[in-house]
Amino acid sequence: MEEIKSDSPPQHRLISVESDAVLSKPAKSKRVASLDIFRGLTVALMILVDDAGGEWPMIGHAPWYGCNFADFVMPFFLFIVGMAIALALKRIPNQLMAIEKVTLRTLKLLFWGLLLQGGYSHAPDKLTYGVDMRKIRLFGILQRIALAYLVVALVEVLSRKAQSSVQPFNHFSIFKSYFWNWLVGACILAVYFALLYGTYVPDWQFTVTDSDSVYYGRNFTVACGVRGSLDPPCNAVGYIDRKVLGINHMYAHPAWRRSEACTENSPYAGPFRDNAPSWCFAPFEPEGILRSVNRYNSMLWILIYSRILDNSVKKSTIKETRKRKEQRNKHKDLHGSLIVC
């Protein structure tokens, strides 16, 4: 009997230590699978509309008015970035480190945007490369995402203390916690509409730079002299881009060339009408300054939504942790009673 008693306690202690070690293992950081899946589907959609949009215009970008399948790609990417901001920055408690990471990622996106869409690759099939700095495209999809990411991420980092000071589970906590988000979003919205409808657009001139056009090198004048117009030639979006970026640094093949006023094959691309207005030959930047300002606002709302989702995930994690502790305590009580016996 004495031998059985002397051998039994170490055995029970070994089982208890092993079980505690298994239960106390730190949980691995989990990715949001739904966001990863949505990102993959968005990339697949982008490839589809880029390759097949010319053959099936109903899935390509709308020439001007309307919304087609391809017009959802950019909002989807902005949604993904806005959701990822809150999930990524919460792992960096230090404010300076967070700002450094945001700035570095913004510079990377701007660099790749200029490299991929700035006009570096003139004809990849013919292996002709190089940049004419007088005609480089300054804005593009990645630049637009980069600037929106910079603004929204800085708002998130700098307003983090205000969010943590508000007690949760309040009907008005969404407004108190994200007060600065709402304020910045309201200011951006006010500035956007003020510029869009309040900017006076005078007559403007341009020179056709497309070497394949029969009007290559010819100068055209577009008559405007209006305020608050949303039509292609005389809107404030294009006017601000022409003044700030320069008309030679804008996208040379805008989708408006497929509009009914420009081509007989609309919405398909094709030769211009004989009586096509002069603005059909002009460049236009679909990812320009004022359009990007509106995207900052969209991403701010997405960030608030991602915070709400993150809080719900935290609640479920707390419940899971409590359940794990209860199981651990039950396991310890069970082994304690066995050791005593």
Image: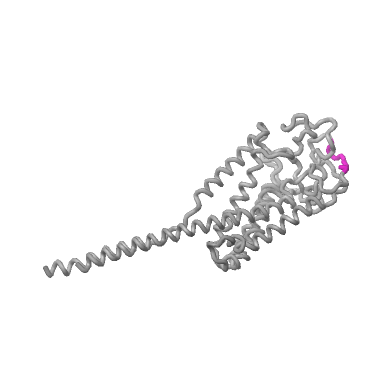
Dividing the picture into quadrants, the one containing residue 6 is bottom left
- Please give left or right for residue 316 compared with residue 52 in the image: left
Q: Is residue 246 visible?
A: no
Looking at the image, the residue that sits furthest to the left is 1
Q: Nearer the viewer, residue 220 or 68?
A: 68
Residue 282 placement (x, y as % from top left): 81, 41
The image shows residue 33, relative to residue 100, as above or below, that is above
The image shows residue 268, relative to residue 39, as above or below, that is above
Tally of marks = 0
Check residue 340 for magenta coloring.
no
Check residue 222 for magenta coloring.
yes
Q: Nearer the viewer, residue 283 or 213?
A: 283
Q: Is residue 212 visible?
A: yes
Residue 32 placement (x, y as % from top left): 50, 52
Quadrant (top left/top right/bottom left/bottom right) for the C terminus:
bottom left
- Please give left or right for residue 188 compared with residue 24 in the image: right
Residue range corresponding to the magenta coloring: 215-223
